[in-house]
């Protein structure tokens, strides 16, 4: 009876289905491996290797073309030739020549290769290395006695390429390199030699990702000498592998054979041969198809096939289980929508008893959460309104007193017209800051407030500091929070022009796409980066002459609170070059 109950459980049925699937899978894999033909695999594998060869060929062609252009440009450069024949290294002409020579080298494709090392050696032993952070580890005499130099001397118009166990500089002195050398000559006379070296390991990166344990790639120069390989045995001159590959390359070149099978011990190797385009270099590929066949079809392919069948079995089981747990999935989908801010994602109560209870609890929680959020939003709106009202009431009493004193002096002086203008400006300024409870005003109103504020300051301190306003078409009716621009004009008026220094404050308003952008610039004394950083971290308290205590960070926080983090202010300044403040906010129209 107990076993009958176990056999009727879902878990037992799942295990039984999985077991039957695994046995079926093993049988299918066995039949598949029996049906695979090794001969077909070898042909397919060789075709794939040929495509890889074509990709390597394209990469090498680009590299060879760049190296040829670099060497041709440098070898034919008048500056290089003058350097090689110059005898006084301390002369002004020598230094000037080196400058032009470095500039010409920089303008070649050399600037695109950070792994190349360029060395010049004159016929009389003077040397130069392009990379100023590196230095030669070999003497000029040693370099001139090198085999690549001797070969370049015999063929002045040819770029000689050799593999060497070490390079000529401190960076490459302990690593194998590929050296490309050519003679720099003038009217049949060799003036010196140009050497371009690259680490063999870095050169190998052009094809290394195409190699594996069952494939080897060997690159040979026009003389049949190995210059690079992912197998170090082929790089050792005189080794059995080195002699064997040269013999194979010579045979395939003479007989114009591009693919053949050779015996190597107990295994058969497939040899692929290809001449690299636009050069006399060769590419030899050694493929071990039998090992590749065993590796591919007895490991990775079997695993992939097994996983595929297993996934199908699990998919069938998942469909069955999902039918039973569909209400729970619906609940999870609704909860994901709630994370994006949608609190109206209620769920229909259905399913098993446990899921029904969970769904009812979730709906109740969502209802309570939505109610709490609405209350919080209302509270925050009231708080923000109170904060804005408090800012509007921050009119500095000293500013009011001093302004009224200035008006009084104008009246005593008998300047009725100017007194009237200042009184009107002051009244309008107070009306828009204290009496007007609206949080938003138009750009036109904000500019009017600025003009009134500046007029009052000019009466009190003189008109040495002037202002200009530039408002693009379509900006005047845009809305912005009240008193956003005034703090920046105020700071410029009092801090950018000390000790009665005159200057200009300019206010620009423009629209760019869906953004309203203001720029407040002055040509005052400017600030250093340290002063800017200090302002951002901790603002100075306003003086008695300031109209309000509204600071830069206050404006920035206010804009980010209203519109988001992508909006706010940005300040730029340089000593003696003035200051620029950029204020960004979205374009809003209408009544708020």
Image: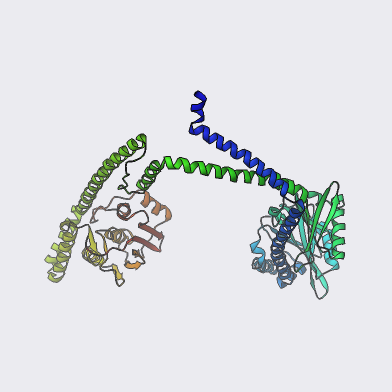
Pick whichever, 148 or 552, lies toward us.
Answer: 148
Where's residue 127, x and y in %? 76, 61
Where's residue 493, x and y in %? 29, 61
Pick whichever, 33 or 591, lies toward us.
Answer: 33
Where's residue 245, x and y in %? 84, 55
Q: Residue at x 25, y 52 (%)?
A: 549
Along the horizontal axis of the image, is 545 left or right of 103?
left
Where's residue 431, x and y in %? 16, 60
Q: Is residue 80 visible?
A: yes
In what quadrant of the picture does the C terminus appear? bottom left
Q: Is residue 145 visible?
A: no
Q: Quadrant of residue 583?
A: bottom left
Q: Residue at x 82, y 61 (%)?
A: 148
Q: Residue at x 81, y 76 (%)?
A: 187
Pick whichever, 287 or 139, lies toward us.
Answer: 287
Pick whichever, 81 or 417, lies toward us.
Answer: 81
Along the horizontal axis of the image, is 450 left or right of 290?
left
State how many labels appear. Answer: 0
Residue placed furthest toward the top: 1
The colour scheme of the drawn protein is rainbow
Whether 387 is drawn above or below 481: the answer is above
Q: Quadrant of residue 422?
A: bottom left
């Amino acid at each position: 009876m107990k076993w009958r109950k176990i056999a009727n459980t879902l878990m037992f049925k799942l295990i039984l289905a999985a077991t039957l699937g695994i046995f079926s899978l093993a049988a299918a894999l066995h039949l598949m491996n029996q049906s695979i033909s090794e001969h077909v695999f070898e042909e397919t594998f060789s075709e794939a290797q040929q495509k890889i060869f074509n990709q390597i060929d394209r990469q090498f062609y680009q590299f060879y073309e760049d190296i040829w252009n670099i060497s041709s440009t440098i070898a034919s450069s008048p500056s290089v030739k003058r350097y090689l024949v110059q005898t006084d290294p301390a002369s002004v002409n020598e230094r000037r020549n080196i400058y032009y020579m470095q500039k010409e080298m920089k303008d070649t494709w050399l600037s695109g290769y950070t792994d190349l090392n360029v060395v010049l050696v004159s016929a009389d032993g003077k040397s130069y290395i392009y990379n100023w952070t590196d230095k030669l580890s070999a003497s000029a005499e040693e370099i001139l006695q090198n085999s690549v130099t001797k070969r370049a001397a015999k063929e002045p118009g040819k770029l000689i390429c050799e593999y060497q166990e070490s390079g000529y500089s401190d960076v490459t002195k302990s690593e194998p390199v590929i050296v490309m050398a050519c003679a720099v000559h003038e009217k049949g006379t060799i003036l010196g030699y140009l050497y371009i070296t690259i680490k063999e390991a870095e050169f190998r990166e052009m094809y290394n990702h195409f190699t594996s344990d069952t494939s080897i790639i060997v690159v040979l120069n026009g003389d049949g000498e190995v210059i690079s390989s992912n197998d170090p045995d082929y790089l050792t001159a005189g080794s059995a592998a080195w002699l064997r590959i040269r013999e194979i390359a010579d045979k395939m070149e003479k007989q114009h054979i591009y693919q053949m099978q050779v015996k190597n011990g107990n295994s058969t190797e497939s040899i692929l041969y290809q001449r690299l385009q636009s050069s006399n270099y060769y590419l030899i590929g050694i493929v071990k198809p039998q090992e590749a066949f065993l590796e591919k079809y007895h490991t990775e392919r079997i695993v992939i096939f097994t996983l595929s069948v297993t996934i199908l079995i699990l998919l069938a089981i998942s469909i069955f289980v999902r039918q039973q747990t569909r209400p729970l999935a619906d609940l999870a989908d609704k909860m994901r929508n709630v994370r994006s801010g949608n609190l109206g994602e209620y769920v229909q109560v259905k399913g098993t008893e446990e899921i029904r209870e969970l769904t009812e609890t979730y709906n109740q929680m969502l209802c309570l959460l939505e109610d709490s959020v609405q209350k919080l939003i209302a509270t925050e709106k009231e708080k923000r309104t109170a904060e804005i009202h408090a800012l509007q009431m921050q009119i500095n009493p000293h500013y009011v007193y001093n302004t009224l004193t200035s008006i009084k002096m104008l009246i005593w002086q008998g300047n009725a017209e100017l007194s009237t203008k200042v009184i009107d400006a002051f009244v309008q300024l107070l009306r828009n800051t204290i009496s007007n409870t609206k949080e938003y005003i138009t750009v036109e109103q904000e500019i009017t407030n600025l003009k009134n504020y500046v007029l009052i300051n000019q009466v009190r301190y003189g008109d040495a500091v002037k202002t200009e306003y530039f408002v693009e078409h379509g900006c005047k009716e845009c809305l912005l929070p009240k008193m956003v621009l005034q703090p920046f004009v105020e700071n410029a008026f009092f801090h950018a022009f000390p000790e009665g220094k005159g200057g200009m404050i300019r206010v620009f308003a423009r629209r760019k796409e869906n953004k309203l952008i203001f720029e407040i610039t002055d040509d005052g004394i400017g600030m250093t980066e340290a002063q800017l950083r200090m302002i951002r971290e901790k603002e100075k308290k306003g003086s008695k002459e300031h109209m309000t205590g509204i600071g830069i960070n206050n404006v920035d926080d206010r804009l980010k609170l209203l519109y988001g983090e992508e909006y706010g202010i940005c300040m730029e300044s340089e000593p003696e070059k003035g200051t620029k403040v950029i204020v960004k906010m979205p374009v809003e129209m209408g009544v708020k």
